[in-house]
Amino acid sequence: MEKTMHIAVIPSAGFSHLVPILQFSRRLVELHPEIHVTCIIPTLGSPPSASKTILETLPPNINSIFLPPVNPKDLPQGLPMAAQFQLAVTHSLSSIHEALKSLTLRTPFLAMVVDSFAAVALDFAHEFNMLSYIYFPAAATTLSTHFYLLKLDEETSCECRDLVEPIKVPGCVPFHGKDLYTQAQDRTSQFYKLSLQRYKRFFGVNGIFVNSFLGMERGPIKALTEEGSGKPPVYAVGPIIQTDKGCGNDANAIECVAWLDRQQPSSVLYVCFGSGGTLSHEQMIELAYGLELSGHKFLWVVRGPSNTPNATYLDAQNGVNPLKFLPFGFLERTKEQGMVIPSWAPQVQVLGHSSIGGFLSHCGWNSTLESVVQGVPLITWPLFAEQRMNAVVLSEGLKVGLRPRVSENGLIEKVEIAKVIKGLMEGEEGKEMLKRMKKLKEDAISALKEDGSSAKTISQLVQKWKTLP
């Protein structure tokens, strides 16, 4: 029997970062059952019930410890959600240290793996004699841009959005400055400064696991892993996504899958903006009219409107009926054309359904990978964080997504929405995108096989761990 190797895993406080690192932990122990993971979880406010549900589905060699929650009121107000997640980890450092100290008295840990927003906890790896790793749940392109931004910060003084020339990160598709992630858009903000501090910490680790694969991001992965780059070792271990396909007892979810069962193959556009994305009321109205105008079948996960695009990450809009914000008569007029479901749908199961022909997405990386694994082409509708960069990768680099044009009033208007839906669902361009996405799906499935690139990458590292004294 092989000796058990113990790994400490520390997510950041955000649910959208907890899920990926838990899925990575699951992948690690499924490939190597001799590994035992203890997940030490900081939270901002009370942990959502969904996180507890996910923990209950994990194998027995993954344990979890919830730390005392950080009160959102104790953090500086007005910061972007990602900065709040990062600062919540900083406020949890004493609790993390106490947990590690107690655990290491009983069991020596071989390594610590932290979420990219929990990099501040890496100091404890040295203190407790552990190897240190970052789990990066986003694209290799985003990781490359983190390193490049440190250089850009030294060489330029203007805002990224004002740069005249496209930004050419090694191995990546060129970006316009306005498409760089949120934290790069205001050099005077605390979020920008916190981000640079975090990226500098990346250089001091034993390695970075990135949730991507060669078939999707060959250029940035090769650039990151070049010898002599000065960067820590980077391990492409993706695509790691949620695998639970069930609806449970959720009535809306069961109803939406039953509705999909009645539709023609590849006929339905799935519309969803992730676990926290929201639209303004004005944009929500335009989207409703655009879906109706397209004439195509749709399944739309609707949330109540907000002028803050990630409003539902900490506010679940409990008690708000999002359907009341739809245009008058919309549900009646489209009852044969589409289905509207409030707040949540079983996305993994929906994307894998034979009736789905396209995905109108906010381009969060989790959703992007789920779409790739199911071979579903996209309409790219980024809202915040690094989603605009993902949209560029998908629409201009991989050419598996159509990006609608934003009008001068800041809205994507109904005629444009109908146009891109038709382009994706019935146009020649959409057919070519589907072919490219099917090839990406094959590459993704291949990477995950026992002898695939991602599985091999993990196994080779674990073999190195086994040779350590």
Image (cartoon, rainbow, N blue to C red):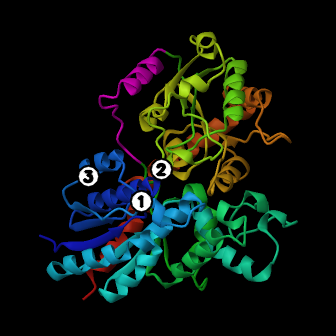
Residue 313, horizontal then vertical, whole percent: 50, 49
Q: Marks 1 and 3: CB-CB under 8 Å?
A: no
Q: Mark 2 — residue?
A: 314
Task: Tell which residue pokes out farthest to the left in this image.
Answer: 1
Q: Mark 3 — residue?
A: 58
Q: Earlier in the sequence, mark 1 or mark 3?
A: 1
Q: In which quarter of the image is the N terminus?
A: bottom left
Tag 1: Cα neighbours inside 10 Å, few (<14), some, or many (≥20)? many
Residue 75 position (above or below residue 247): below
Tag 2: Cα neighbours inside 10 Å, few (<14), some, or many (≥20)? some
Q: Residue at x 38, y 67 (%)?
A: 458
Q: Is 42 a magenta residue? A: no
Q: Mark 1 — residue?
A: 44
Q: Is residue 188 left or right of residue 258?
A: right
Residue 434, horizontal then vertical, whole percent: 63, 36
Residue 55, horizontal then vertical, whole percent: 28, 52
Q: Say what secondary structure mark 1 lies in.
A: loop
**Distance from Cα at disc 2 to Cα at disc 1:** 8 Å
Work out whether residue 273 or residue 166 is closer to the camera in this orientation and state it.
Answer: 273
Work out whether residue 26 or residue 306 is closer to the camera in this orientation and state it.
Answer: 306
Residue 454 position (above or below residue 277): below
Q: Marks 2 and 3: CB-CB under 8 Å?
A: no
Q: In which quarter of the image is residue 306?
A: top right
Q: Earlier in the sequence, mark 2 or mark 3?
A: 3
Q: Is 259 a magenta residue? A: yes
Q: Say what secondary structure mark 2 lies in.
A: loop
| Residue range of the region highlighted in magenta in the rendering | 242-262
Can residue 134 be seen here? no
Mark nearest the camera among 2 and 3 is 2
Q: Which residue is drawn at 66% across and 60% down?
A: 182
**Distance from Cα at disc 1 to Cα at disc 3:** 22 Å
